[in-house]
Image: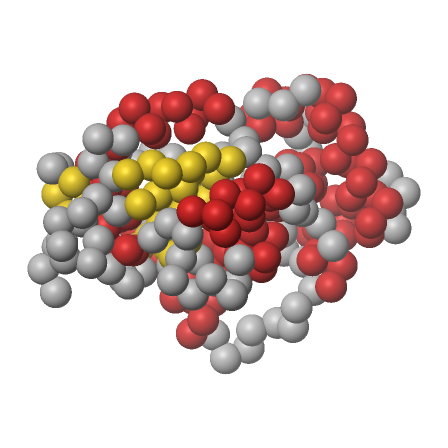
Amino acid sequence: MPDSTGPEGAGGGGDGALVRVVLVDDHRMFRTGVRAEIGDRVDVVGEADDVASAVAVVRAELPEVVLLDVHLPGGGGVEVLKQCADLKQVRFLALSVSDAADDVIGVIRGGARGYVTKSITGDELVRAVGRVADGDAVFSPRLAGFVLDAFAATDVPPIDEDLDRLTQREREVLRLIARGYAYKEIARRLVISIKTVETHVSAVLRKLQLSNRHELTRWATDRRLV
């Protein structure tokens, strides 16, 4: 199938119209940057910064493609996918800073049509949007391997109900804690406050019924999350 996109615009449906897109990311400056970079080549019909507002705008606008961040207040990108699962005409493309295998596999299992990282260029993102609008699956090269390995495996482990209790952000904090990062380092890497890190850690310990970061590290290591 020939590539239906190019620098001049992402066309969906073959009629030359720009693909209608909703941007979902909890960082306003990032959304502004994406709009400035590709807004003349796609039709940005809405934005959202958390799960509730994302579900509302997607249902109201029914875009062709949703650019969806994995880590969002209110339950993460997976929760948006779950609440919009009945909207078969809307396709989701994950756009995240995270390249962790469990993030990638989680949103793909949730129904996203692709996953690209925020290191993508504007031209590449426009092409990815156009391909997803046309029904293709799109992945950053390294991430495609995660998906192939996960769905080709014959010994896929059962769903971990304990892990499923955690939001995407809590999982990311969990991994960094288990890798030995201090709260200050985690705050800097995730661009959040130390207080927010402490809140996430407390939530993780409570949900997993663990007492301290040493037990948390052992729990994560046992599940090969580190």
Q: Quadrant of residue 31?
A: top left
Residue 197 in the image: state x and y as whole percent. Answer: 72, 28
Q: Quadrant of residue 18?
A: top left
Residue at x 61% of width, y 72% of height: 157
Q: Residue furthest front?
A: 60
Residue at x 30% of width, y 51% of height: 141
Residue at x 47% of width, y 74% of height: 153
Residue 85 in the image: state x and y as whole percent. Answer: 52, 63
Question: Relative to 182, is 39 on the left or the right?
Answer: left
Residue at x 33% of width, y 28% of height: 35
Q: Is there any visible trace of residue 136 in the rendered image? A: yes
Q: Is there any visible trace of residue 101 in the rendered image? A: no
- Near-viewer residue (107 or 186): 107
- Near-viewer residue (184 or 168): 168
- Near-viewer residue (135 or 57): 57
Residue 60 in the image: state x and y as whole percent. Answer: 48, 47
Residue 47 in the image: state x and y as whole percent. Answer: 45, 35
Give the answer, above or below, for where 214 lies relative to 224. Answer: above
Give the answer, above or below, for where 76 lies relative to 155. Answer: above
